[in-house]
Image: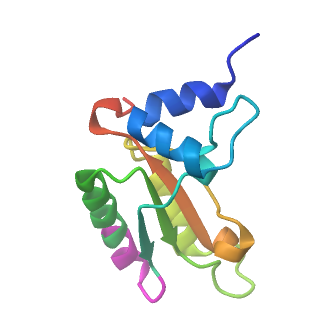
């Protein structure tokens, strides 16, 4: 039987203490491990009301603070964008910044009741696990 890809992800990016906490509190995958989607959120940033340039700076500061504090999962609330414009500029910037940050692993959107596509969660890697 082959190992599930989520098992490799969790072992790589979650310290053993967090894995145990997640197993106790979160929903489990087919392999018996918890999905990153169900890891508790450690910190939240709300970018409503910021201009694009201000939001970019604030996001960088927020991620730096979270990494320094050892946060594992963060939530960025960016909104869905202006009416009729499709994807909002801040939402798009958040996605690009997260994709280009070596300390960010998996990302996704929370359930609709928790913000849906108006927010993005991100798993943070420990400094020694930074992708190159």
Which is nearer the eye, 27 or 100? 27
Farthest-out residue, left:
68
Q: Is residue 48 left or right of residue 83?
A: left
Residue 4 figure quarter: top right
Instruction: Point out residue 61 in the picture as x, y percentages from the top left corner.
Output: 27, 65
Q: State whether residue 121 is above or below residue 119.
A: above
Instruction: Point out residue 31 in the picture as x, y percentages from the top left corner.
Output: 71, 28
Q: Residue at x 41, y 83 (%)?
A: 51
Q: Is residue 55 magenta?
A: yes
Q: State whether residue 80 is above or below residue 132.
A: below
Q: Residue at x 59, y 79 (%)?
A: 79
Read off the magenta span. Answer: 48-57
The secondary structure that dominates the magenta segment is: helix
Q: Is residue 131 left or right of residue 87?
A: left
Way the structure is coloured: rainbow
Q: Residue at x 46, y 28 (%)?
A: 12
Which is nearer the eye, 61 or 75? 75
Q: Is residue 107 magenta?
A: no
Instruction: Point out residue 26 in the picture as x, y percentages from the top left corner.
Output: 62, 50
Q: Is residue 104 left or right of residue 33?
A: left
Residue 41 shows in the view: yes
Q: Quadrant of the C terminus?
A: top left
Farthest-out residue, front:
24
Q: Residue at x 65, y 77 (%)?
A: 80
Q: State whether residue 101 is above or below residue 31.
A: below
Residue 15 shows in the view: no
Q: Quadrant of the N terminus?
A: top right
């Amino acid at each position: 039987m082959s190992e599930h890809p989520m098992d490799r992800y969790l072992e790589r990016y979650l310290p053993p203490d967090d894995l145990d906490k997640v197993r106790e509190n979160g929903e489990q995958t087919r392999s018996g491990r918890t999905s990153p989607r169900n890891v508790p959120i450690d910190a939240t940033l709300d970018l409503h009301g910021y201009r694009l340039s201000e939001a970019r700076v604030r996001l960088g500061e927020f991620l730096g603070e979270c990494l320094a504090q050892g946060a594992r999962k963060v939530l960025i609330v960016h909104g869905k964008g202006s009416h009729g414009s499709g994807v909002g500029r801040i939402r798009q910037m958040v996605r690009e910044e997260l994709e280009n940050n070596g300390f960010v692993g998996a990302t996704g959107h929370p359930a609709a009741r928790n913000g849906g596509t108006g927010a993005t969660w991100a798993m943070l890697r420990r400094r020694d696990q930074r992708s190159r």
